[in-house]
Amino acid sequence: MSTYQELKGLKVKYLAANPDPGTAGDVWYDSATFALKGFVGRAAWSSGSAMSTGRNNIAGTGTQTAAIGAGGYFEPPATFYASTEEYNGSGWAAGGDLNTGRFGAALSGSQTATVCFGGIASNPDGFTVNSESYDGSAWTEGPNTNTARYLLARAGTQTAALAIAGGAGPRQAVVESYDGSSWTEIADVNDSREMLGGTGTQTAAVVAGGNAPGTVGSSEEWNGTAWAEGNDLNSARVNLSASGIQTSAIMCGGPHPNASNSEFYDGTSYTVTAAMATSRPGLGTSGSGAGSSVAAIGFAGAPYSTLTEEFNNSFEVVTAATWASGGTVPTTLRSGGGAGTKTAGAIFGGNQSPSPGNVATTLEYDGSSWTAGGNLPATVVNNTGTGTQTAALSIGGGPPVSVSTNEYDGSSWTDAGDLPAATAAMASIGTTSAAAAATGATQFGPANSVTASFNYDGSSWTAGNAANTTRNGAGGFGTSTAGVMVGGYSPPGSVYLDDTEEYNGTSWTSVNDDLLIRASFGSAGVQTDGIAYSGQDPGWPTGLLVTSGYDGTNWSTRPSLTTQHHGGGYSGAGSTDNFYAGGGPSGATPDNVTTTEEFSGDTPTETASSIDFD
């Protein structure tokens, strides 16, 4: 007797919309479009946050959400980098420096357990046998390789690695195996070559491309005992990089025109896949391991690039984090307070240059344009704000320096109780029912900075425990029981800061520093997902473009703004999908700006594909 499956086939869901959440391999009939659909992987590269230092021939390994890059080269002047940067899936942060600066080295392992070997350590032709191991914070000198070389390939882990081919004047065929304590020469590759790509494990690796001499596309596989010729790349290329395992690898990078596309290797043959936006030689990439051919990363490369790109083969299309232009601010305001999000924000008070000076103006933003709201009771500058567009606080400011706090309901401001001490340029966090404000200045200028901290319960302020660092012009984000304060400047003079403190509702605790020093900048988000952006540094009057992100432990890079400005309006609470408006001076001319920029974090979108049987 026939079964239902034999007579009717497999059952398919009948849906009016895509399943949510989706799962790779889902298939359904879409009744709205009258089509059979499924969640099928799509290969694509997307932009990631830039590295802090541009360089080429950097060594890289790890995963897309925990990558590491070390060493590299820059000129002029000739610089052999020892610096290490770590990627957390959102941005880059500094790691421990190599003991020996070098370029053209190789990394094998993970972000917290990797080994660096080979490279050029000095001019002229300082090919090195130096090997170092990394534990996630510091590099330790390890046993040297037997053969000095650079631009070599790698495979494996920190304690089970391969150093493959490379150059040392003449091209090399030498392969060495590492067990965590010593390097041992094993079977050579068939073709001597340098500037090749390699990935996989110590017993199942693949190498391709390089200079042998001349640019080649040949590929070889390692089975733990011997190397065997495999099928060639579709495009011969040199100075390429690799990620993945022997049966699922991505080869990418290299100079134009041959390397505009990446190639996927399935253990038998290479297939051209998605192109990088900026193909370049000398990339660092994620390393060996399952999944890294469907979630890879490429970073740095020639000519001294800071670019990062992420590769995904998924039904989720990732739109990278970015700043985008928003509506023009009607007046040239700076150094006021701000609250809300990029689709429902407000800025209030500040200085309108060149006239009439300090204002009581409130402007509201709906995600595309600015309109006038209710005015503050009095003109004010260097006030701080927190909350939402319809429930905001304006705290302190001057001149003269004030104790005033006012609450906004979306149309008008009312008195909300005085601060215990007159203060301007404070950092603030929280909402109209539970806020905190800290540090600032009792008179305008860094010399009058304080460590005072105050808590607000919706009707009145009380003194809290002091912050650890004297400062004003700091940024704040988060809630009244899980907040962050960062940056600012302190006496004597204008000493710009990168100091970060976390607040638990009772006390302030010093934590890891921001990536750079700055004051009078924007900040937004929550304690475990915040950003600090733009502002001023000792190079004032030019504003900064840099954005950094905080994950509750460390700061790392984020996409930069497009306009230099500081002291604009911004929110100190809520989502990192936020805005920066107005501010100044911009560039060498000390003019306030009317620019609005909107920040959006990485956005994955589930994308269904129609299934066509034709």
Image: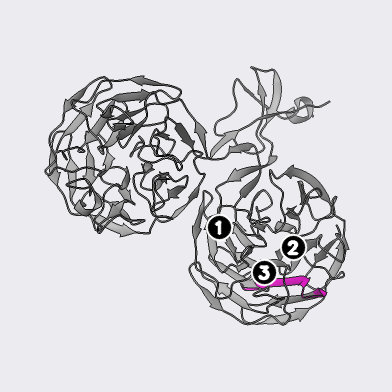
Residue 13 % position (x, y):
64, 26
Q: Look at label 2 and name its amino acid.
A: Gly
Please identify the quadrant where the C terminus is shown.
top right
Would residue 163 be counted in the magenta stretch? yes
Q: Which residue is mark 2?
A: 198
Distance, label 1 to label 2, CA atoms, is 25 Å
Q: Secondary structure at mark 2?
A: strand
Distance, label 2 to label 3, CA atoms, is 13 Å
Local packing at callout 2 (Cα closer than 10 Å; few below 14, some 14-19, many 20+) is: many
Q: Which residue is mark 3?
A: 105
Does residue 597 appear left or right of residue 81 in this picture?
left
In this picture, is 438 found above or below 331? below
In this picture, is 108 found above or below 502? below
Q: Which mark is residue 53?
A: 1
Q: Are marks 3 and 1 in contact (CB under 8 Å)?
A: no
Local packing at callout 1 (Cα closer than 10 Å; few below 14, some 14-19, many 20+) is: some
Point out the frontmost of discs 2 and 3: 3
* Depth order, front residue of 343/375: 375
Q: Secondary structure at mark 1?
A: loop
Residues drawn in magenta: 159-173
Would residue 518 be counted in the magenta stretch? no
Point out the frontmost of discs 3 and 1: 1
Distance, label 3 to label 1, CA atoms, is 17 Å
- Picture quadrant where residue 121 is located: bottom right
Q: Earlier in the sequence, mark 3 or mark 1?
A: 1
Q: Main secondary structure of the magenta part?
A: strand
Residue drawn at the location 30% of the way across and 53% of the way down = 489
* Depth order, front residue of 541/113: 541
Colouring used for the render: one colour
Residue 482 % position (x, y):
30, 47
